[in-house]
Image (cartoon, coloured by chain):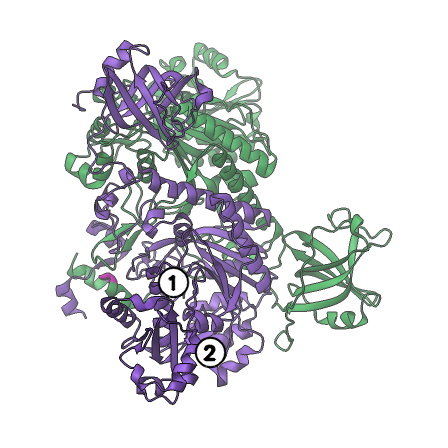
Chain colours: A green, B purple
Amino acid sequence: MSDVLVLDRLDDWRRTSDCGALRAADVGCEVCLMGWAQFRRDHGGLIFIDLRDRGGLTQVVFCPEGSEAALERAHVLRTEYVLAVKGTVRARPEGMANPNMPTGAVEVVVTEFKLLNTAATPPFPIEDRIDASEMLRLKYRYLDLRRPKLAANFLLRHKAVQSIRRYLDTLGFLEVETPVLTKSTPEGARDFLVPSRMTNGAFYALPQSPQLFKQLLMMSGFDRYYQVVKCFRDEDLRADRQPEFTQVDIEMSFVDEEQVMNMAETMVRTMFKEAADIALPDVFPRMTFAEAIRDYGLDKPDIRFGLKLVDVSPIVRESQFQVFAKAELVKGIRVAGGAALSRKEIDDLTEFVKIYGAKGLAWIKIKEDEWQSPFAKFLSDAERQGLIEALDIEVGDIVFFQAGAPDMVNTALGYLRIQLGERFGLIPEGTFAPVWVTDFPLLEYDPEAKRYAARHHPFTAPQPGNLERLADAPAEALSRAYDLVLNGSEIGGGSIRIHDRETQKAMFAVLGIEAGEAEDKFGFLLRALEYGAPPHGGIAFGLDRLIMILSGAKSIRDVIAFPKTQKAMCMLTEAPGEVATAQLRELGIKLRTRDKDKETP
Amino acid sequence: MSDVLVLDRLDDWRRTSDCGALRAADVGCEVCLMGWAQFRRDHGGLIFIDLRDRGGLTQVVFCPEGSEAALERAHVLRTEYVLAVKGTVRARPEGMANPNMPTGAVEVVVTEFKLLNTAATPPFPIEDRIDASEMLRLKYRYLDLRRPKLAANFLLRHKAVQSIRRYLDTLGFLEVETPVLTKSTPEGARDFLVPSRMTNGAFYALPQSPQLFKQLLMMSGFDRYYQVVKCFRDEDLRADRQPEFTQVDIEMSFVDEEQVMNMAETMVRTMFKEAADIALPDVFPRMTFAEAIRDYGLDKPDIRFGLKLVDVSPIVRESQFQVFAKAELVKGIRVAGGAALSRKEIDDLTEFVKIYGAKGLAWIKIKEDEWQSPFAKFLSDAERQGLIEALDIEVGDIVFFQAGAPDMVNTALGYLRIQLGERFGLIPEGTFAPVWVTDFPLLEYDPEAKRYAARHHPFTAPQPGNLERLADAPAEALSRAYDLVLNGSEIGGGSIRIHDRETQKAMFAVLGIEAGEAEDKFGFLLRALEYGAPPHGGIAFGLDRLIMILSGAKSIRDVIAFPKTQKAMCMLTEAPGEVATAQLRELGIKLRTRDKDKETP
């Protein structure tokens, strides 16, 4: 059918508005709308079409009063056909208005129309409620993106980015582009490589962040820099990661932590207000890394709800319950009303904490007459009394415990807390709770490599006097880093940077980066530090995650126009794909086949 | 010396303004400035420093009235040291004001200062007039970028981009990001490839432009899209090309040429006004491709000056001068006063046109008493009279001719015209002359491949009725493409796209792309065209070139913060570089060494 229809040309037709604009006040106007036939209904010899574009839906009516000829031709119209209509706005008949539709008071009586394109039946309906598989939706991404709810995420994203740009522009930040084809950056993750044709055997790397370039721009005297920039990490993709992601990257000269944090806080607050009319707190709360771990177990605390972790180590240090007595750290978490949890649910939670290295999950249900628990019998009266006071225990509660190495205890209970918050409906919908986390350790121990690595990156400045602590107590040295956490997700992080060469060299030494390697990888930075680098610091936001939280999207793929799967594939274009051998030859590379692997391991 | 100096911490010092802000009205104010010591002058026991930051220069004075201690310490200060000073603004003494400096009426009497960093002697002075080699400047790019004239280009670039964004935002364009890791795009140039680790043997390509993605966004109903986006071409670099470049990429639905051109024209006009206070014409002139070639020889006419090409073929068709008589096309260009050119200059111009395929360059100097020329003797009186009238010849002129195949004649004379315009000072400085070129041929003949290729790209719509002409007169079919040319450079180009599947398939067929290949390369586009693609079109601007013209920079490298050399190398970071074999193994590739080449050709 669609093959035989002759398409009309647009000629000099011009839209008078989008399909979401018309109101009762427009009755009587001559209009021209263009869009897609969302829905067709034939009734009493008339044809009704809901015409859709980015702005919304308008009901257009093909009827004899408008044009007999148009009505006659309208019989060919099907879902997703593209049309342009001219007509007159009229009030819908008494009782036919649709108060759920912004244009629901009116309809357009079609006097003339053009068929701009036909459409095959889509593989899934263009509706917000959809049960098509995500793979199918990604293959037909252009149809998926027609769904108003998904499309709205991109309008929100646009508004958010424009708001950020406006704000930074007001403060004198310059948007400067940094290279995409660059040198391997030392962010710790795996680089995407690009073979060089002009220098066979050499490779560019795609940037994991413009970190060193933005520092160099400060050394150039650019003073205030920002960029909304694609970054790349060739990592095995977790559910909400993408190989390419977008960062709002910011750097300032002659500033300390307060100035960067105040700027960033106001930027986020302004953006939430302008893009989504959401009011964030006038002052974002702050906590130290140590406080976050103590109370929430994680360095990205979700402060929308309580359920804080409580250190009960002193209470159970002498306990008969050996699991507690022997542990370096014992922490508990009390859930009001949690005694109602079934055995199955507790088993599920036990499996859940094992993801984070826990061997099991100790629990006590506080019943009217007893403490129901596999191990309560080992607890002395004094211990019970201590727990009651420390955890504020009441009848009907459940208390979970984790005992062992502090990292495991905090991580396992931290994530358990989130699970429990969701299970018990403690996390308020539509609430946005930002919090700054500060005073991070400068280093973190890498048990595999058996050495310390920079917790943020090797360019983060130590707090005053803390460089010296690295020698005797490396784990205790604190950095001038700060993270902005929103609803339990890290949305931004940054630091004051090292701006003098001697400190930077000392830091490389502490990290076990030898002088030769430092020169090889970071020689240009060390050289730049010789020529008058100003004090500087900055922050970077993960834009995709930020928009995901702002929009309430369930997946990061819902805020990226053309995302990749967890296998890093584009279902739409079928990238990556094979290339001609001649192309590889020009690049001085060839494929390593399995057979050849054996020859040249 | 610098090694032993202990750097001060910024503590709670805050800048009160930048170094370009203070004026006579500020006398008496307490201020805090931070920046670089541009210049130190010791005079009468006092120390004067010109302190520089992005905002400008301020003279600061270390003197006993300010602080004996500060004066004492100031003796360590050297060029490019970084300092923070607190002090009092005072009027410069009678006769010492510097009217060439915005802050020249005042100076700051230093009461306290911090030494924030030292600096080794830079490898070249931080001055606008510089004779260091570009390679050295690129290696120390962070120092090069401190030069105010170069830094100003990036402020201008920032302003230009913000203006463009504001304008497009006003019109309802959404900024949408498209993938960087994608499928090979069919722009005709060589792709940069990125080997996939997850799918060994497969490669991503970096986009040459987001052409197909922006068309897909129109099919998604996004209606109006833009993006300021990095694009990539792995080509041998001409003087003003970079392997990565920035495009202002725009697409609109339900529009024709007029709407795209009007939008783009206003965007450029608004940007010139807002970013640089330059007024462009209220209406940009337009000419067809045929007119441009006829009058200027090139499809990117520089209309800032005359020297139009004149077709003299009819006049010399029967000439005794066989070079003219036999030629398919003979065109001349008259230069008023050009008879003063030396033989050496004419020889140089002859060599110049050979670049464009000319075998030589015919010329006549019009002297008082004779036509001085190697071939004038072959010209009849009638031919001379014809040339005088056609070319408006006067005594003192020189006329250059080119005869032969039209493409060569037009190209050689077109570029000769530019040379002559420069040589004779005909190109007004500081003038900006935009012009639209329209009605391009749809195809162009590729003599190497011996077939027609799309002149713009295979998605450009033919003019009404012109698809049908492809069969009998392929060279005559016109497209719905348009270019915006500024001062002889193409700064933007676009077209109305094909939006129906049958036309797109027909176009692929005309271009010799077989059905299988079309499906393989563009299957997702052909599929998308089945589901209701709206009429759409767009344009893309080369931002780097546009800013280069706007700023008057001589090289595109002067408007890119971290550019690459013609060998596509970054002198600063030394990218591209070698990578570990283990990395290549993960990617399933290995280097093709010369020896192995012999084994497996």
Q: Residues within 10 Å of mark 1 (few under 14, many from 20)?
A: many
Q: Give the residue number, with chain letter if any, for mark 2.
A: B509
Q: Residue furthest front?
A: B369
Task: Say whether disc 2 or disc 1 marks the residue closer to the N-terminus.
Answer: 1
Q: Give the residue number, with chain letter if any, for mark 1.
A: B184
**Same chain shared by disc 2 and disc 1:** yes
On screen, A6 above or below A90? below
Residue type of the residue flagged with mark 1: Ser
Q: Which residues are magenta?
A: A587-593
Q: Residue furthest left?
A: B595
Residue type of the residue flagged with mark 2: Ala
Q: Residue furthest right?
A: A94
Q: Quadrant of residue A600?
A: bottom left
Quadrant, the N terminus of chain B? top left
Q: Residue B91's spot in the image, x, y percent?
A: 40, 18
Q: Quadrant of residue B384?
A: bottom left
On screen, A96 above or below B466? above
Judged from the image, the secondary structure of the residue bearing numbered disc 2 is: helix
On screen, B339 above or below A34? below
Quadrant, the C terminus of chain B? bottom left
State the residue at coordinates (15%, 38%): A516
- Side of A153 relative to A481 (left or right): right
